[in-house]
Amino acid sequence: MDFAGARDYIIGRMRKELNPSLTYHTIEHTLDMHYAAIRLMEMEHFGDEHERLLIETAAFYHDAGMMVSYNDHETQSVLIAGEMLPTFGYSLEDIDEVAGLILVTKLPQMPTTLPEQILCDADLDSLGRDDFFIESFRLQLEWKLNGIAQTTLEEWLRFEVEFFTSHEYFTKSGRALRQEQKRKNLLEITTILERLK
């Protein structure tokens, strides 16, 4: 299994093919998610090396479908992974697992295994970081540019409140690392909304 080859292939392709209107689902988001997944695997003492590489592969491929379609991009990501990973020596069992890991990142997230939980927490890591508002407004802009939704500041922040209250970090490490800042971010959102009244 040539993980480095599979990684370099999809990074190179996404750098060229992702539409500039994707201001949130960028290659930087993919790299950021990969880093978050590695950190969570370490914190969770996840030791199976082969499984770790499958989680890392899923992190790199999870938004590759954005090159094809915005809606249901996870399905397109699975198709890309299924087409390309065999050329890098991934077995059918490996590809099936990567596909399952990609699909579980689709909202609403409902992971059941630790690898799935790690990937879901890594994907939404920014909710509990101090750069949350930067990432949030990048997503708002992306939705506007791609015709997903046109929202005022108040409408967007109300959407975020709803999303925050329905979201939870699944891993113990994710909660320990991000829950407190996520709480502060939600408090900041509600404070801004109060001032907008």
Image (cartoon, grey):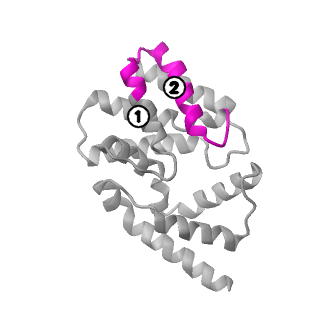
Closer to us: mark 1 or mark 2? 2
Q: Residue at x 62, y 26 (%)?
A: 13
The residues tagged by marks 1 and 2 sit, at their Cα atoms, a distance apart of: 13 Å
Q: Residue at x 42, y 31 (%)?
A: 98
> Does residue 34 sit above or below 3 in this rendering?
below
> Does residue 63 sit above or below 8 in this rendering?
below
Is 88 included in the stretch rendered in magenta?
A: yes
Q: Nearer the viewer, residue 176 or 108?
A: 108
Q: Residue at x 67, y 29 (%)?
A: 16
| Quadrant placement of the N terminus | top left
Provide the secondary structure element on which disc 2 rests.
Answer: helix
**Disc 2 target residue:** 81
Residue 48 place in picture, x, y as percent: 24, 32
**Disc 1 target residue:** 56
Few, some or many residues within 10 Å of mark 1 (<14, 14–19, 20+)? many
* Identity, as a three-letter code, of the amino acid under mark 2: Ala
* Identity, as a three-letter code, of the amino acid under mark 1: Glu
Q: Residue at x 43, y 71 (%)?
A: 183
In the rendered structure, the answer to whether residue 8 lies left or right of residue 178 reads right
Residue 138 place in picture, x, y as percent: 65, 55
Residue 152 place in picture, x, y as percent: 73, 69
Q: Which residues fall within the magenta stretch?
A: 68-96
**Dominant SS type (magenta):** helix
Image quadrant assignment for residue 168:
bottom left
Provide the secondary structure element on which disc 1 rests.
Answer: helix
